Image (tube, rainbow, N blue to C red):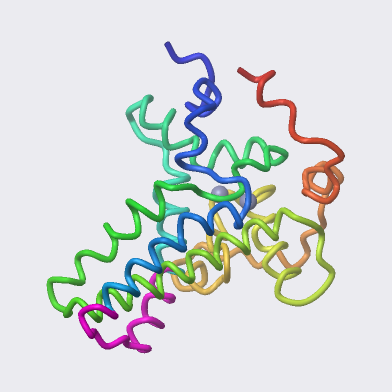
Amino acid sequence: MKKSKFMVQDYPELIKYFASVNPIHLFLYVLPVVLVISSVMNSYNMNFSVIFFLFGMIYWTFLEYLIHRYLYHSHFKNRIVNYFIGSFHLYHHANLKDHRVLNSGLLMILIVAPTVVAPFLLFLNLSQVLSIMLGLSSFYYIYECVHYLIHYREYRSGYMAYIQKYHMQHHQHSPNKNFGNTSHIWDLLLGTYDPKYKEYRMSLKVKESLITNSSKVFEGFQNNI
Ligand SMILES: [Zn+2]
Ligand SMILES: [Zn+2]
């Protein structure tokens, strides 16, 4: 019987399927996918397409936006679905100090990536589709690294300072805006851009949640169950 708000709290052993501790862990999931695709392309003398690879990267930035906005932050009529889906991201919103969920896990790369690329087989050849898959997997990995680094330490300048303010504005003040995790482009195009992130100041509570400022491993998890 359900006891907590999110499934991951009642069944913590499930965490390994949809979350990972850091991008190094995640690399072990992404690397085999990239190696298998590359060796299939090699064995069948398929031509790698840079254009479709780049398209795959851009495609991921769009999916990153859609998944975050329409899946992770959605409230479904079915309570069990909310209980399950909430574990992917809303749990992260509610538990910034639980660094085990900063990255997604096995399910994303092994199920979501092939599912979103497969429809291209209807009008592209296999080498073009596999090039898209390589681009998508590569940028997916970059996206995961960016999210990990956002929660790693506080940044003063450059890209990381910009994207950290952007993402933390979403976390703290505008959960219905700023869904992009690597840029604000899709938010701008689709009407969910909140420019107030430019004035974002990190609160002490958020500073304490950053990996470099956490003196000990998150302990609240077990207590929450
Ligand atoms: Zn986050
Ligand atoms: Zn969110």
> Residue lying farthest left?
122
In magenta segment, residue 107: no
Please provide percent x and percent y for residue 155: 81, 65
| 105 relative to 172 in the view: left or right | left
Please report the residue visible at 66 percent of the width from the left and 36 percent of the height from the top. 95
Please report the residue visible at 41 percent of the width from the left and 51 percent of the height from the top. 108
What secondary structure do most residues of the magenta stretch adopt?
helix
Q: Nearer the viewer, residue 181 or 42?
A: 42
Above/below status of 219 relative to 129: above
Please provide percent x and percent y for residue 106: 43, 47
Please provide percent x and percent y for residue 78: 33, 28
| 4 relative to 161 in the view: left or right | left
In magenta segment, residue 43: yes
Above/below status of 70 relative to 83: below
Q: Nearer the viewer, residue 21 or 175?
A: 21
The boundaries of the magenta stretch are 42-60
Above/below status of 161 relative to 211: below
